[in-house]
Amino acid sequence: MKAGTLELNDVHKSFGNVDIIRGVSLTVEARERHAVIGPNGAGKSTLFNLISGRLSVTKGTIHYEGHAVQNRPPWEIREFGLSRSFQINSVFNSLSVAENLTCALLPSTSHGYGVFRWVQRDVSISREVERILRELGMEELANVPAGLLPYAGQRFLEIGMTIAGNPGTIILDEPTAGMSRTETAKAIDLIKRISQDRTLIVIEHDMDVVFGLADRITVLVYGEIICTGTPAEVRASKAVQEAYLGRAHS
Ligand SMILES: Nc1ncnc2c1ncn2[C@@H]1O[C@H](COP(=O)(O)OP(=O)(O)O)[C@@H](O)[C@H]1O
Ligand SMILES: [Mg+2]
C-alpha cells in the first residue's frame, strides 16, 4: 500500500468535562517520519487512539488519504492502510511468533469467500509471515511461543505486527520503552527500515531516538501543539525549551 497522508483539523477530546486534546491541527505528509513528544499526560496516546479509531473525537476532523476517519471503527481505518501499535504489550503469549503474525494478517485478508480463496489466502498468508519474519530478523524464532521471548523480542514482534498487510502508515506508541541501549539501537534500525516507503508517526520519550529518526517533530503539552518543525527548529524553539526540553530532558 502506498504511503499515506494524515490530516488533523481542530481535533478535540474530552473525558467527562476534562478537555484532554484541545484543538490539534496537524498534517503528516506521505513518507514523512514524524515524532510526537511531550510530558507524561500530555495526551499523546489519546491522540493516537483518536487517529486509530479506538476513541471518538469530541470535535474536529481526521482525514487519512482523503477519507474522513474520525469516529470510524479501528478495523475500517486499518483497511485504509493505517496501522498502529500500543504502548502496552499486546502479543498473544501462548501463540508462536508466526501465529501472532498470522493473526495480525487476518483482518487485511478477510475479503471474499469460497474454498479456493481460502487456499490461495493460506499460501499468501504464510508467504507474508515469512516476509515479515525476515524483515524482523526473527526467522529462527518463528515457532517459539511469544510469551517465552525476552521483553524486547516481544516489542519487536509487536512492531512486526504493525506491518502485517503492508500498511501505508504505521503509528507506534513508545516502541523502545523499557529497552536497553543496545536493544533501542536495534529497534531504531528496524523502525527506519520498515518506514522506508511508509509514513511513520511515533510517540517517543528517548530524545536521541527522536532526533535521530524524525524528519519533523510535534511537541504536545496539555493537549495542545506548542511546536511542529524539523529537529533543528524544535531544538531552537523557546516555547519548547521552556515547556519541555529545558526541564525534563536534554
Ligand atoms: N479513557 C480515559 N478516561 C479518562 N481520562 C483519560 C482516559 N485516557 C486518558 N485519560 C487522561 O488523559 C490524559 C492524557 O493521557 P495520555 O493520552 O495517556 O497521555 P500521554 O500518552 O501523553 O502520557 C491523562 O490525564 C489521562 O489520565
Ligand atoms: Mg502515552
Image: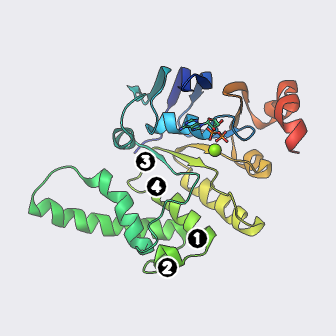
Name the amino acid, label 3.
Pro
Task: State how far apart marks 2 and 1 are (Cα).
Answer: 10 Å
User: Quick one: label 2 or label 4, which is nearer the N terminus?
Assistant: 2
Identify the secondary structure beneath mark 1: helix
Ligand 2 occupies quarter: top right
Which residue is disc 3 drawn over?
A: 167
* On screen, residue 69 above or below 156: above
Instruction: Give x and y (percent) for residue 24.
Output: 61, 23
Cα separation between marks 4 and 1: 16 Å
- Image quarter (top left, top right, bottom left or bottom right) of the C terminus: top right
Q: Is 160 displayed left or right of 201 in the figure? A: left
**Residue contact at pointers 4 and 3, CB within 8 angstroms:** yes
Q: Earlier in the sequence, mark 1 or mark 3?
A: 1
- Place of residue 53 in the rendered image (x, y in percent of width and height, measured from the top left): 43, 37
Does residue 119 sit above or below 148 in this rendering? above
Query: What residue is drawn where x is 60% and y is 55%?
Result: 191
Tell me the residue that label 4 is attached to: 163
Residue 103 got which mark?
Answer: none
Relative placement, left or right, of 34 versus 68 is: right
Q: Secondary structure at mark 4?
A: loop
Q: Quick one: label 1, few (<14), some, or many (20+) residues within 10 Å?
A: many
Q: How far apart are the two marked residues, 1 and 3, measured between alpha carbons? A: 22 Å
Whether pointer 1 and pointer 3 mark residues with C-beta atoms closer than 8 Å, the reply is no
What residue would you read off at disc 1?
A: 153
Given residues 60 and 237, the one toward you in this image is 60
Mark 2, Cα crowd under 10 Å, few <14 / some 14-19 / many 20+, is: some
Q: Residue beneath label 2, please?
A: 141
Q: State yes or no: Cβ of the residue under disc 1 lies below 8 Å from any atom of ligand 2.
A: no
Q: In the rendered view, does 228 fall on the left or right side of 160?
A: right
In the rendered image, the residue lying farthest to the front is 16
What is the distance, in whole Å, between disc 2 and disc 4 at their CAs?
Answer: 18 Å
Q: Residue at x 56, y 50 (%)?
A: 195
